[in-house]
Image: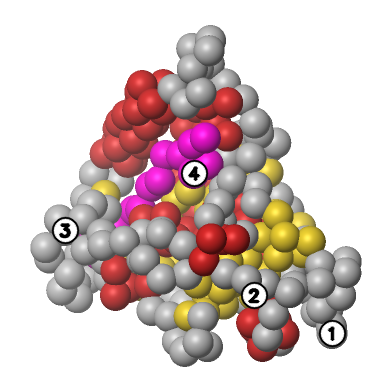
């Protein structure tokens, strides 16, 4: 990487870090503020997502006016050296049920693509203060500490598999450890990247949902797998279609062990 490109990347990282924390702090204004007696306050979530998305859009336009903001209707995906080669993928809220209920397991994610290839990924959890970030194919961090997927040699009763809400309706599992659903896919992936969980099974996601944490898990030495072990290519879902199939997140040695259960 040339010195000029290196300096440019530093500017991009600084912007990404500052803006995700700024919008995340703004999200706290809505956090846990659902109407009394309402099980799920959809209007609260909608308002928060609109405010946060507009705040990000404004900050991006002010700082990098030539950059693009990802949406499902982006038509020009041709290679270019112009500033528009940068596309930001912002997901205002992951873990919306937790968010509106006042449970701290939720966050904001941000990814940066260059000619539609990922170069940065960040996930910020304002209620806990955790910031996960990674430069593609380099290193992943939780705060200032580098993180890596776990290297557990065998699955046992202390192992942790993070699962989605309807996991037990789709799978019969003899996994000997703990099966947990924390209600936030991005947090699940980041905890696998940190070695705090052995693997995660996710489902019903989209490109926007996974753009940031894909960078983080891969930089930490892990991967997103199809359940049959074949390659999963997130860019196949750039047009916004839902990823209906379940996916397994783990380190390189974890797939075979976890899938065996």
Disc 2 target residue: 250
What coloring was used for the rendering?
secondary structure
Look at 26% across and 62% down and name the residue there.
Answer: 241
Distance from the alpha carbon under mark 4 to that under mark 3: 22 Å
Disc 3 target residue: 74
Disc 1 target residue: 153
Look at 36% across and 66% down and name the residue there.
Answer: 243
Please tell me which of labels 2 and 4 falls first in the chain: 4
Please tell me which of labels 2 and 1 falls first in the chain: 1
Q: Residue furthest left?
A: 75
Measured as percent of width and height from the top left, residue 83 is found at 24, 59
Disc 4 target residue: 94
Measured as percent of width and height from the top left, residue 140 is found at 64, 65
Please tell me which of labels 4 and 3 falls first in the chain: 3
Q: Which residue lies furthest to the top in this view?
A: 36
- Near mark 4 (Cα within 10 A), the count class, few <14, some 14-19 or many ≥20, is many
Is there CB contact under 8 Å for labels 2 and 4?
no
Look at 88% across and 69% down and name the residue there.
Answer: 157
Distance from the alpha carbon under mark 2 to that under mark 3: 31 Å
What residue range appears in magenta?
84-97
Q: Which of marks 2 and 3 is in front?
A: 2
Please tell me which of labels 1 and 3 falls first in the chain: 3
For residue 69, which numbered disc appears in the image? Answer: none
Is there CB contact under 8 Å for labels 4 and 3?
no
């Amino acid at each position: 990487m040339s010195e000029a490109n290196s300096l440019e990347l530093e500017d991009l990282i600084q912007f990404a870090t500052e803006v995700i924390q700024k919008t995340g702090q703004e999200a706290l204004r809505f956090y846990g503020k659902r109407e009394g007696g309402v099980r799920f306050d959809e209007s609260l979530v909608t308002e928060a997502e609109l405010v946060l998305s507009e705040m990000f859009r404004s900050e991006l336009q002010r700082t990098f006016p030539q950059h693009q903001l990802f949406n499902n209707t982006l038509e020009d995906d041709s290679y270019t050296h112009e500033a528009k080669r940068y596309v930001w993928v912002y997901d205002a809220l992951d873990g919306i049920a937790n968010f509106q209920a006042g449970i701290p397991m939720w966050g904001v994610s941000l990814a940066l693509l260059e000619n539609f290839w990922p170069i940065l990924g960040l996930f910020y959890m304002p209620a806990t203060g955790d910031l996960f970030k990674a430069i593609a194919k380099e290193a992943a961090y939780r705060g200032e500490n580098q993180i890596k997927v776990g290297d557990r040699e065998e699955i046992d009763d202390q192992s942790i598999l993070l699962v989605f809400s309807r996991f037990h309706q789709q799978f019969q599992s003899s996994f000997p450890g703990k099966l947990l659903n924390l209600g936030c896919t991005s947090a699940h992936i980041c905890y696998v990247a940190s070695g705090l969980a052995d693997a995660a099974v996710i489902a019903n996601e989209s490109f926007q949902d996974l753009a940031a944490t894909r960078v983080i898990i891969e930089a930490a030495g892990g991967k997103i797998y199809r359940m049959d072990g074949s390659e999963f290519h997130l860019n196949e879902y750039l047009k916004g279609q839902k990823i209906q199939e379940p996916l397994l997140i783990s380190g390189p040695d974890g797939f075979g062990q976890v899938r065996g259960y």
